[in-house]
Image (cartoon, helix red, strand yellow):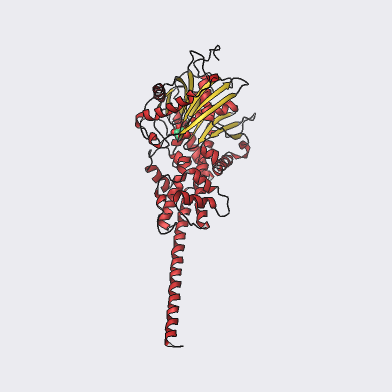
Amino acid sequence: MGKVAVAAAVIGTAAVVGVAAVVVRQRMKSSGRWARAVAIVKEFEEKCGTPEAKLVQIADAMTVEMHAGLASEGGSKLKMLISYVDNLPTGEEEGVFYALDLGGTNFRVLRVQLGGKEGGIVHQEFAEASIPPALMCGTSDALFDYIAEKLANFVAEEEQIFHQPPGKQRELGFTFSFPVMQTSINSGTLMRWTKGFSIDDTVGQDVVVELTKALKRKGVEMRVAALVNDTIGTLAGGRYTHNDVSIAVILGTGTNAAYVERAQAIPKWHGPLPKSGEMVINMEWGNFRSSHLPITDYDHALDVESLNPGEQIFEKLTSGMYLGEIVRRVLLRMAEEAFFFGDEVPPKLKIPFILRTPEMSAMHQDTSSDLRVVDEKLKNILEISNTSLKKRRVVVELCNIAATRGARLAAAGIFGVLKKTGRDIPKEGGEKTVIAMDGGLYEHYTEYRKCLENTVGELIGDESSSAITFEHSNDGSGIGAALLAASHSLYLDDTSSS
Ligand code: GLC
């Protein structure tokens, strides 16, 4: 071999060794990064753990807080608000009523014709609009004017057959899904905003007065006959179709529950004892908190940076407004500390609330063998491309961890209500409990829903679980508000005009 050839061979070998060293270093680097990413996921999973024993502790804490909230105003984080609904729909409600449903990013106006006994819901129609984000943090007048205007447009399209006879005002059930201290069935002051709304000048105001003023400004002739929370509306709507409904749970942007309580078990109620002996209670369970709740650093940071720090802790662990955001926070940490998406942190991943729960749910429920939906969502929402299948599986796992914790906690809440009302143990005579469920999370996130229902079964045991059923009360809260407007109508005894 000549000198040149030997030199070339030496250089060649050195190059091979050099490349091999780079490859080895890169492999070590990437396996180090992978290990770090896996460790972050593992830690998240551990901290989100909801073993059955913990759920029982949470349910017990919920019942303790329920008692405390019923005992005195401000006695608990659970407000246990008195709804002034002491009679749920009977099926005899009759006439044309409106409903206005405000509680999340969308609101709806409804027109419902009730046909009395045997008649059922003869006619219903609705219009939906989204609330412009600027109005969620603006002024009270701006928000209520916007709503009143949409209602005015809807009323303007009312067909002749739905017109009220002369001298009779249209009546409305107002579903306002925020914590309200009611002073009667159709008055109540807003205690504080939740779910991303923050309009200072509404807090402490009577929301029926606010709405009525706006209706006047927009020239709408309408009487607000009932003011209800969405849980109360759902309970009323659920009872209309099913006699055994006694609990309602909302799992949507926010979460909450309402149930029928014995009036005598409400020490803070100083009014006359209702004839029915019952009163529906709006728990506002979104604000529940307990040392037993599995709270991670991600949840803590989310809470501190939220519009309502320290409040709605249960809601921030379980509801649709927050689940996607929790997953985003874990992914961001993996990108920053384990370079999960390459050397750069994808800029979009730094934007709070960019990953919405419906997108998270679509990724979680991706059944394609190559996780195509995950790939697409990562690309379209976060501008992250070229992920390996292995990484996409990790993303699915994160969604699973966050959704499972949320669903199991919500199940523990339901178990708490069942315990408080003595419905957790089988009754002689086979008393049934139907739980009216509503909200986008419950309706659309199948994995979440299945996990929630299975967990309630796990907690109450086989013997009792056959007596408990869940019923999706579609649009129950709007219809329920119309029904309650009907049963609190000014014209109840007025047979001539019906
Ligand atoms: C929030 C509100 C509550 C509502 C729930 C579901 O928790 O405070 O009033 O019922 O969201 O919409």
x and y, in percent, of residue 435 in the image: 56, 33
The answer to whether one can see residue 294 in this image is: no
Residue 267 lies, with reference to residue 312, above or below; the image says above
x and y, in percent, of residue 23 in the image: 45, 69
Residue 368 lies, with reference to residue 358, above or below; the image says below
Which residue is more in the foreground, 178 or 426? 178
Which residue is more in the foreground, 265 or 329? 329
Residue 367 is left or right of residue 265, and the answer is right
x and y, in percent, of residue 92 in the image: 58, 19
Identity of the residue furthest to the right in this view? 429
x and y, in percent, of residue 371 in the image: 54, 53
**What residue appears at the point 34 percent right and 29 percent down from the top-left corner?**
201
The answer to whether one can see residue 280 in this image is: yes
Which residue is more in the foreground, 323 or 256? 323
Pick the quarter of the image with the C terminus.
Answer: top right
The total number of labels drawn is: 0
Quadrant hosting residue 133? top left
Residue 326 is left or right of residue 125, and the answer is left
Which residue is more in the foreground, 346 or 207? 346
Residue 189 is left or right of residue 98, and the answer is left
Identity of the residue furthest to the top in this view? 496
